[in-house]
Image (cartoon, helix red, strand yellow):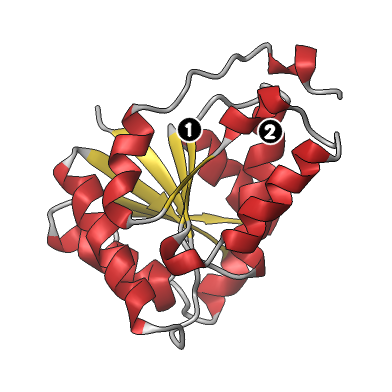
Amino acid sequence: MNKKICVFCASSAKVDKKYFDATVSFAHDAIKNSYDIIYGGGALGLMGTLANAALEEGGNVIGIMPEFMKAVEWNHNGLSELIIVDDMRERKKQLIERADIIVALPGGCGTLEELFEAISLKRLGKITHPIIILNYDGFYDSLETLLEHMIAEKFMVEKHRPIWAFVKTPEEIVPAIRSSAEWSADAIQFAVV
């Protein structure tokens, strides 16, 4: 059975073409390396591009979407599976719980909210998934700086740094997954600073 990569990314169709190109590159890489994709189920923006590129490669793509989004037809109609849930909380919960790996591509506030929930859960040992953040063309430079600042200011500690890994190109994502440090389910023992 293939491992599932949960992908958080933008639904905006107005972002620069370079982000679409990076998404296609990652999707092709993931499927060629026998990963399944699980994501928010959308048809637009990087979300739709991710699904289309993975499906074109013959990949298995699972979408999870709240009913209110499907009601306004934001869902992708060609997915391997579309799971409809009650609300955003349930969507995020299922995305994270069904995944083996988490990848954050460039995105907006929804992507950040999902990413930080995953980071918090991993810090507490509730998940042990690799978390890879694509800092493509410097998109997440400020986030990387902020996380380092949190460590420097003792809101987190050095031992928390392996919770996530930043990469600069889509081609680095799969190797980063493979080389990701093991994380303990007992991480709650050192969650508090």
Rate crowding at label 2 as few (under 14), some (14 to 19) or many (20 or more) other CA atoms within 10 Å.
some
Q: Nearer the viewer, residue 182 or 126?
A: 182
Q: Is residue 175 left or right of residue 71?
A: left
Q: Residue 56: x percent and y percent? A: 14, 63
Rate crowding at label 1 as few (under 14), some (14 to 19) or many (20 or more) other CA atoms within 10 Å.
many
Disc 2 or 1, which lies upstream in sequence?
A: 2
For marks 2 and 1, give the CA distance.
12 Å
The residue under label 1 is 130
User: Disc 2 marks which amino acid?
Assistant: Leu
Q: Is residue 189 visible?
A: yes
Tell me if residue 106 comes above or below residue 36 in the rendering. below
Q: Residue 59: x percent and y percent? A: 19, 50
Q: Residue at x 70, y 44 (%)?
A: 148
Q: Quadrant of the C terminus?
A: top right
Label 2 sits on a secondary structure element that is: helix
Tell me if residue 104 comes above or below residue 97 in the rendering. below
The residue under label 2 is 121
Tell me if residue 110 comes above or below residue 28 in the rendering. below
Q: Residue 143: x percent and y percent? A: 65, 57
Q: Is residue 29 left or right of residue 37?
A: left
Q: Is residue 80 visible?
A: no
Q: Nearer the viewer, mark 2 or mark 1?
A: 1
Q: Residue at x 31, y 46 (%)?
A: 172
How many numbered circles does the render carry? Answer: 2
Label 1 sits on a secondary structure element that is: loop
- The extreme front residue here reads 152
Q: Nearer the viewer, residue 95 or 157?
A: 157
Q: Residue 111: x percent and y percent? A: 59, 61
